[in-house]
Amino acid sequence: MLILLVFTVLATCTTSFINLCAYRLGQGQSPHSPARSYCEHCHRALSWWQLIPICGYLLQAGRCRFCRQPINPYWPLSEASCGLLMFCCGGADVFHNVLVLIFLMALLFITTTDLLYQVLYPLSLIGLITLAGLLPDWHWSSPSSLLIGGGFLVFIGLLTLPRHGMGSGDLMYLTVVFIFFGWYKGVILLLVACLLALPCFAFSRATVRLPFLPALCLATVLVLIFCP
């Protein structure tokens, strides 16, 4: 239990760092420069207690201490969500917990960059290789499964890319997912992602392009948990 609690706290703290990396990368900055984290509104350096995951947000009542501008609730919500998922999916095995942590941080980075900048960095997909260890019965998909899955992705691409319904980053992510989950679970994952994204698409303006990778990442976690 102690190991699980340690990894839960570690996941929450690592989430804060991954979010910082994703945010700064889109701003053309590096994770270590500027040296101090800052408010995205007034750009004043934050105190140590403001950087405590979840607690810093609550202590400031959701507003920057300096400029009183609202803090993006995505930051504490993602910290709490990753900590909760780590607690639910982890265990007493340290190696398994490390795989879960890497997997969650990869999904978080993909989600954050797509939400903020609608971009997928292909290198972030490397973190999904941990699925090979998280899926107990995983093996390389058979040629027939790869052929069916590849044909399905080509069909989806031809159907959606010309109409800008799905981006190339979405298809790259789905390609990796189909390799690990197979075509059957891959299709289920895509359907779950569409259902998760449906309310956002229903109430959004037609001219606004909505990010789809967050729904795909959440669907990946759900399929991993409920369809082992």
Image (cartoon, rainbow, N blue to C red):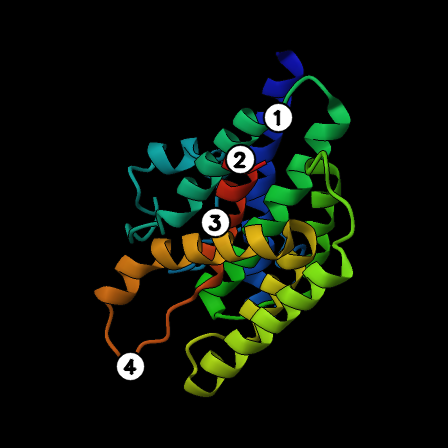
At which x and y percent is residue 125? Answer: 68, 59
Q: Does residue 27 appear in the picture of this structure? A: no
Determine contact: label 4, label 3, CB under 8 Å.
no
With respect to residue 111, does 225 lie above or below? Answer: above
With respect to residue 56, does 68 lie above or below? Answer: below
Whichever of labels 4 and 2 marks the residue nearer the N terminus, that label is 4
The quarter of the rendered structure image containing the N terminus is top right
Determine contact: label 2, label 1, CB under 8 Å.
no
Q: Name the residue under label 1.
A: 90
Whichever of labels 4 and 1 marks the residue nearer the N terminus, that label is 1
Residue displayed at 64% across by 20% down = 91
Q: Distance between the residues labelled 2 and 1?
A: 12 Å
The amino acid marked with disc number 3 is Ala
Q: Mark 2 points at which residue?
A: 225
Determine contact: label 4, label 2, CB under 8 Å.
no
Q: Mark 4 points at which residue?
A: 207
Using a 10 Å C-alpha cutoff, classify the residue at mark 1 as few (fewer than 14 neighbours), some (14 to 19) or many (20 or more): many
Q: Is mark 4 on a helix, strand or loop?
A: loop
Q: Which residue occupies the foreground of this view, 62 or 124?
A: 124
Q: How far apart are marks 4 and 1 (CA)?
A: 41 Å
**Is 199 placed left or right of 129 in the picture?**
left
The amino acid marked with disc number 2 is Ile
